[in-house]
Image: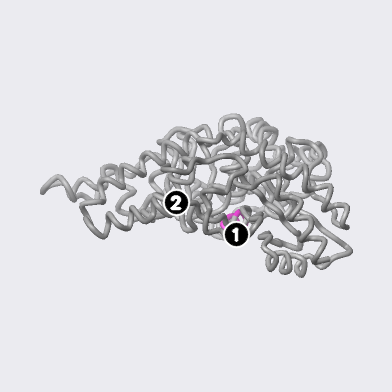
């Protein structure tokens, strides 16, 4: 990584970042020097060598695939490189071997990415969409799980949920939800964009069948880039309704091995990679590997604990200024986000004025959201609180 090494609480790798406190990683992360250098290298090599550079970057994608698999406890075969979270969800929603009348369970309060594709699937395949309230898991997890069990007892083909709720920052009890899904024969799909890179997540421990994630938030890569996980045995049961020339086994062979290899009858891949349909975002995948190297080097568990220390300092001081914290009291319900509501303050106005003062944050669905990551230093909390006092 050159002359700068990743270190918890150090923003040395972000010399161009203007904000004095960047707390908007749950929206879009800034780019490190490792990312910008890797993208420049990709562009420079493509400019210099054109097609000659292509094989080198194909090898890079295989290395990235292995690192993403390690991040979530999967195998490389179970990882597809995708353009975004939505595409991964939509591909699976369209490719499950649905039967009319089957139920899909979604949650009110979810980001639309993990609702709209299931609504479309319900309309196209004659499915019944069932709803629970995501916020019930924040207010009373045990009762919410009982309500979930009652729905699953009625028969549900697939449950779709976010690992972390985008507006409240609540970390859903995926292990307990996965256990219930296994008990009642329900597939589990997880939108992991608000978790991967900062909040630990393991697909085996949580019995997750499908997972989709973009790279521009906690993975600290570029937008227009992400990945999809499909459990090996589930991939073999899908009916890929979106496919392209690279969905075939040995899809590149006819371009590099002479005559006689062009065929339209090659079998489709029986893995998540069937959804890698054509030419992809090479610069984005180069960027993602660079950012992921820093995260894996630090360790996701260490990143999570570092951010909890930051939020432990910030939360009580913000609450004292007239805000209601939505952060879970128990560690198992916490992510790397602190979301707040207020009856006393206009949170949109507060957000705008904080950004003017160099404190980058976000305001989804009426919540003031602070989302630090590994580069944030706990020492900056006092400046954040001071800026907040100034704008109230």
**In the depicted view, which residue is nearer to us: 125 or 387?**
387
Q: Image point 83% across, 41% down: which residue?
A: 140
The x and y percentages for residue 48 are 23, 57
Mark 2 lies on residue? 35
177 left or right, relative to 45: right
80 left or right, relative to 196: left
Q: Residues within 10 Å of mark 1 (few under 14, many from 20)?
A: some
Is 76 located above or below residue 287 in the figure?
A: above
Cα distance between the residues tagged 1 and 2: 32 Å
359 left or right, relative to 234: right
22 left or right, relative to 77: right
The x and y percentages for residue 293 are 46, 40
Dominant secondary structure of the residues highlighted in magenta in the image? helix
Report the disc number at residue 336: none
The residue tagged with tag 1: helix, strand or loop? helix
Q: Image point 59% across, 55% down: which residue?
A: 118
Report the disc number at residue 116: 1
Residues in magenta? 114-118
The residue tagged with tag 2: helix, strand or loop? helix
């Amino acid at each position: 990584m050159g002359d700068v090494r990743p270190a918890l609480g150090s923003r040395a790798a972000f010399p161009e970042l203007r904000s004095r406190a960047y707390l908007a990683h749950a929206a879009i992360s800034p780019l490190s020097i490792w990312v910008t250098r890797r993208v420049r290298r990709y562009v420079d090599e493509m400019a210099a060598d054109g097609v000659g550079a292509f094989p080198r970057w194909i090898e890079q994608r295989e290395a990235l695939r292995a690192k993403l698999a390690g991040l979530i406890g999967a195998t490389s075969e179970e990882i597809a490189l995708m353009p975004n979270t939505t595409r991964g969800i939509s591909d699976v929603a369209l490719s499950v071997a649905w039967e009319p009348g089957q139920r899909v369970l979604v949650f009110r309060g979810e980001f639309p990415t993990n609702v709209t594709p299931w609504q479309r699937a319900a309309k196209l395949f004659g499915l019944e969409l069932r709803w629970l309230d995501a916020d019930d898991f924040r207010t009373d997890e045990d009762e919410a799980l009982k309500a979930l069990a009652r729905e699953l007892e009625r028969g549900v083909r697939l449950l779709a949920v976010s690992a972390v709720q985008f507006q409240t920052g609540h970390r859903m009890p995926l292990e307990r939800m996965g256990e219930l899904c296994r008990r009642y024969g329900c597939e589990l799909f997880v939108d992991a964009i608000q978790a991967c890179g900062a909040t630990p997540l393991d697909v085996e421990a949580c019995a997750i069948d499908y997972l989709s994630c973009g790279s521009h938030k906690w993975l600290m890569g570029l937008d227009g880039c992400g990945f999809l996980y499909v459990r090996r045995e589930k991939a073999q049961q899908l009916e890929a309704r979106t496919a392209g020339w690279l969905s075939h086994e040995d899809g590149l062979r006819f371009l590099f091995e002479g005559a006689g290899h062009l065929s339209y009858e090659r079998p489709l891949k029986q893995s998540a990679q069937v959804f890698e349909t054509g030419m992809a975002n090479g610069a984005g995948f180069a960027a993602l590997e660079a950012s992921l190297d820093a995260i894996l080097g630090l360790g996701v568990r260490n990143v999570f604990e570092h951010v909890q220390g930051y939020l432990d300092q910030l939360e009580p001081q913000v609450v004292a200024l007239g805000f209601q914290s939505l952060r879970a009291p128990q560690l198992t319900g916490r992510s790397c986000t602190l979301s707040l509501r207020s009856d006393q303050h206009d949170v949109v106005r507060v957000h705008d004025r904080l950004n003017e003062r160099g404190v980058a944050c976000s305001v989804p669905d009426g919540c003031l959201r602070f989302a630090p990551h590994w580069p944030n230093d706990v020492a900056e909390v006092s400046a954040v609180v001071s800026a907040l006092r100034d704008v109230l």
